[in-house]
Image: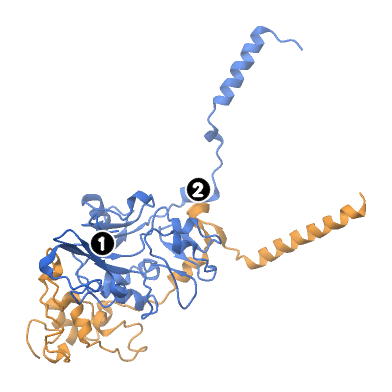
Amino acid sequence: MSSHVLRPLWVVIIIVILILGARFIIVPPDFGIQERGFMYGYHRKSNEDDWKAFKVKYRTRKYCKDCHPDKYEPIMSSKHRIIQCENCHGPAVDHPEDPPKLVVDKSRSLCIRCHARLRYPGTERAKIKGIDPEEHNTGMECSMCHNPHKPDMEGW
Amino acid sequence: MSISRRDFLISTLKIAAASALPLSAFKILSPAEARASVEASTVRWGFIVDTYKCVGCGFCVKACKLENEVPYEAPVTRTWVERYLILKDGRMVADTPLGGRDGFTSLEIQEEVVKPEDVAKAFFVPKLCNQCENPPCVQVCPVGATYQTADGVVLVDRTWCIGCGYCIMACPYGVRFFHPVYKVAEKCTFCYHRINKGMKTACVGACPFGARQIGNLKDPNDPVTKTIMTQRVAVLKDEYGTKPQVYYIGLDENVR
C-alpha cells in the first residue's frame, strides 16, 4: 500500500491510542456500571463511601444525657421533651472538644416557630399555646419569664 | 438441485419451529443484573411525611442546613416546608418563606394577611428528595456524576459533576439546586452518612412532632413499612411515573 494512505492511518491510530490512554489515566478504576444498571448506576463506586464519611453534627439527646442529667431530667418530664436539645443549643458536633461551648439560641424567633399564634382550623398548630409576637412583651427574651426546660411553670 | 416434497415439508417445519423459539431464551444478563441476582440489597430507604402532624416550625429545615453544610443564608435548601391555605371563598394561597427555615410565624402570606376565620382548611407540607425508583434526574446526567445506590438513594459525585444543570431541570419536584460553594448539583441524600450509622436523618431527628419518619422498605417489620402497607398514603406527582419513595399521609389534591 502506498505511503499517502499509510501515513494518515498511522496518525489516526496514534490519536486513538492517546485518547484511550488519557481515558485510562483520568477515569478512576472503580468507575462503571454498578448495582442499579447502566441507566441509574453508572458512577464512581467509592463516592458512596465519600458520602458515608460525611461528618455527623446533630448527635441527638442521647449524646447530651450522661453529662447533663441536671438539664436532661427536668425537660424529659415536661411538655418540651419532644424537642431535641440541639434544636435550641445548636449541633453538638464533637462537643466538649469542638466546640468547647455551645451557643444557646435564646432569641424570640426560636420560640415563635411554634408559639406564634396561628389558629388555622384542622391543624395541630392551632392547638399549641401561642402569642402574637408583635404584641406580647416585645423586645424581651421569652426565657426572661418562661423556663424552656419547665414550660408549665411561669418563671424560674 | 432437487428436493422431494417430503424433505421440503420437513425442513419448512424445522425452520418454523426454530424461529418460534423466544428470543429471550438467548438473552445475555448484563453484569449489573447478574450481580443483583446474587447479592441483592436488603435495604431500600423510604420516607413517610405525616402532614397532619406538621405545625410548620421549620426545625427540620434548620437542622438539615446545619447538618449538611448547606449555606444557611443562601436561598437554597435540601428540604423545605410549604404552607397551604384553602380559603372559604375558594381561593388557595401557599408560601414557603426561606423554605420555612425560620418557621411560620405570621398570618401574612404572599403579602396578604389571611385571618384564620377566613380559612376553610390549612396544612403544612414538608418536602424533600423523593429518592424515586425511576429518577429522571439520574437519566439525564451526561457524565455519570449522579446515580442511585443499591439501597435506593440518589447521590451526586461532587468530584465528577460538571455543573451543567440538566438534573436540576429534570427533577419534577424541584428538589435539586446548584450548590453555591462547591458549584455542583446538590440534593437531599437522606443523610446517607447518618442512616448508614444506624441514625435517623437530621430532619427526622429534629422534628418534635414525629411528622417525618425514615425506614427500610425491604424490612416488613419496620414501622415505616408497616404504615405504608396498612395506611392510606399517597405520593407526589404519581402521573410522572417516577415512583417516589417518600409517602405522604393526608396529602391534599391542592399540593403540587
Q: Quadrant of residue B87?
A: bottom left
Q: Quadrant of the C terminus of chain A?
A: bottom left
Q: Nearer the viewer, residue B12 or B200?
A: B12
Q: Quadrant of residue A72?
A: bottom left
Mark 1 lies on a secondary structure that is: strand
Which residue in the structure is indicated by mark 2? B33
For label 2, the crowd category at 10 Å Cα-Cα, with few meaning under 14, some 14 to 19 and many 20 or more, is some
Q: Residue furthest right?
A: A2
Which residue in the structure is indicated by mark 1? B49
Q: Which chain is blue?
A: B
Please, which chain is the residue tagged with disc 1 on?
Answer: B
What type is the residue that disc 1 sits on? Val
On residue B93, the disc is none
Whichever of callouts 1 and 2 sits on the residue coming sooner in the sequence is: 2
What type is the residue that disc 2 sits on? Glu
User: Chain A appears what colour?
Assistant: orange
Mark 2 lies on a secondary structure that is: helix
For label 1, the crowd category at 10 Å Cα-Cα, with few meaning under 14, some 14 to 19 and many 20 or more, is many
State whether residue B212 is above or below residue B16. Answer: below
Please, which chain is the residue tagged with disc 2 on?
Answer: B
Question: Can the viewer see residue B214 in this picture?
Answer: yes
